[in-house]
Amino acid sequence: METKKKSSVPVILAAIVVIAVLVVAAATTNADTVQQTFWALVPPLIAIVLALVTKEVYSSLFIGILAGSLFYSGFDFEGTVTHIWQDGIITSLADSYNVGILVFLVILGVMVSLMNKAGGSAAFGRWASTRIKSRIGAQLATVVLGCLIFIDDYFNCLTVGSVMRPVTDRHQVSRAKLAYLIDATAAPVCIIAPVSSWAAAVSSSVEGMNGFSVFIRAIPYNFYALFTILMMVMLTVMKADYGPMAVHERNALKGDLYTTPDRPYENANNETGDADKKGTVVDLLIPIISLIVCCIIGMIYTGGFFEGTGFVEAFANSDASVGLVLGSFFAFVITIVLYLVRRVMSFNECMECLPEGFKSMVPAMLILTLAWTLNGVTSSLGARDYVAALVEHASESGGSLILSLLPAMIFLVGCFLAFATGTSWGTFGILIPIVVAAFTNQPDMMIIAISACMAGAVCGDHCSPISDTTIMASAGAQCNHLNHVSTQLPYALTVAGISCVTYVVAGLSHSAVISLIVGAALLIFVLWLLKRTVKTDVEEMK
């Protein structure tokens, strides 16, 4: 098998660079001068670079938090420690929205453990193997299921992963490829779905206008999301994997789904016991359907639907964190009742899945906590205000040509900000109000620019190793997180480059149809060119 060899040299070089950056910062800055400057973006960049170089995400995130806290306190020891723990980690875990997401993660982990132990996942794998006959079919089925579960990206990642993992394993699809398919059908699908938590977040960012109407009009211009879906289909049909993903796919065909020695989820929830013989497809489908229905009800409940608010408005006003917790809890109860009535599992066996499910989600929960803390530290340095000021200045000082190029520039700024902070919601929450103010008298350009904000936010979120959605996709596929990041990055950057060109076309033509045709043709041509020029054994896929 082809494996990645570890070397201490990159780690040493990365450590030297980090130390040099901190020394320069200590000599040239203080707590006031780093606020709303480029220095505010340095801590997340340190974390991201370290994670990619060292292949170790926990320490990389913590060093990023440490660097940001040093900047914030002016390199004062007490202030640094206080900012890391009291203002950082403890505050992140005290946030009710964040706690709700962690509880949702735990409940989903428990449900996955229940479905595995009851034999529902294995039964679905056996059923699917009689209908899905090829690797292409397994991957396309994953894409279709991901597109159908568009309510919320967190929910999408873990549900699609638990349902499709047995199927893709059977057809020797690498865990890295499964993680990419999950991630690419999470945020990119949610950001173009009118009924989703993302639509609600975008609508709330558009002040003084009908936010939902703006969201609908922006969908045809959301090139990154649309081309990501096309990218998945073309990669699968053309068998055109390239970059690190090609190595993972070749190894998967030889029986190694993980490639690297580090495979933290390999033995997670493998024990199904005697229940595996009793389990049927029903034992998977009813819990999953219950989860979908209950989560939808939970979200519209928090939006006031049962108090007379309309369905769409209820989604726009929903609290995704609380709604998902309520929905997953009731789905959990329904699942236990189902298994007890069907005598697939005893009550004690069901309760044994509680700690097992919790343990399976510990890696994702730890990374999420550190990522949220890093985001909070970055915000305390004024990173968002710094980027917002840059965009506002560009929009005010540009001529007619610059104005036409602004959507592409906004897309790139959104990519960078979301990549550095790991949050797409925070990114378009900052950029959309600026765009609305800048293009008040040009409604067509405003829609294109708003879509560029959304697309850039999703793109940066998709690429970032500290993004919660990226972390969730790794957990859903039970894939090493940095394997997922490194294999997904070339694909995301390919679509990002084509999307940027397409936004230039849109800025000049003001036509969604022309832009989509140009972008789609360019994407297909690039994949065809890569397939011809990049030598890969993936041609021999079954």
Image (cartoon, rainbow, N blue to C red):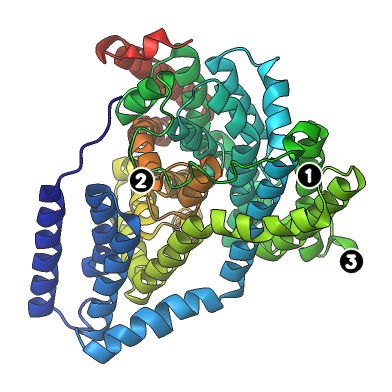
Q: Quadrant of the rendered structure where residue 119 is?
A: top right
Kind of element beneath mark 3:
helix
Secondary structure category for the residue under label 1? helix
Residue 294 rendering spot, x and y as whole percentages: 80, 52
Task: State the residue position of label 1.
Answer: 287
Q: Say few, some or many: other residues with alpha carbon within 10 Å of mark 1 (under 14 / 14 to 19 / 20 or more).
A: many
Is 502 situated above or below 445?
Answer: above
Picture disc at residue 307: 3
Q: How far apart are labels 1 and 2 at the CA level?
A: 30 Å
In this rendered view, identify the residue nearer to me: 260 or 98.
260
Q: CA distance from mark 2 to mark 3?
A: 45 Å
In this orientation, does residue 114 appear? yes
Residue corresponding to mark 2: 482
Question: Nearer the observer, disc 3 or disc 1?
Answer: 1
How packed mark 3 is, by other alpha carbons closer than 10 Å (few <14, some 14-19, many 20 or more), is few
Mark before the other along the chain sequence, 1 or 2: 1
User: Percent position (x, y) of residue 457?
Assistant: 45, 50
Residue type at mark 2: give it.
Answer: Leu
In the figure, 119 relative to 465: above or below? above
Instruction: Determine the residue positioned at 78% across, 35% down.
Output: 279
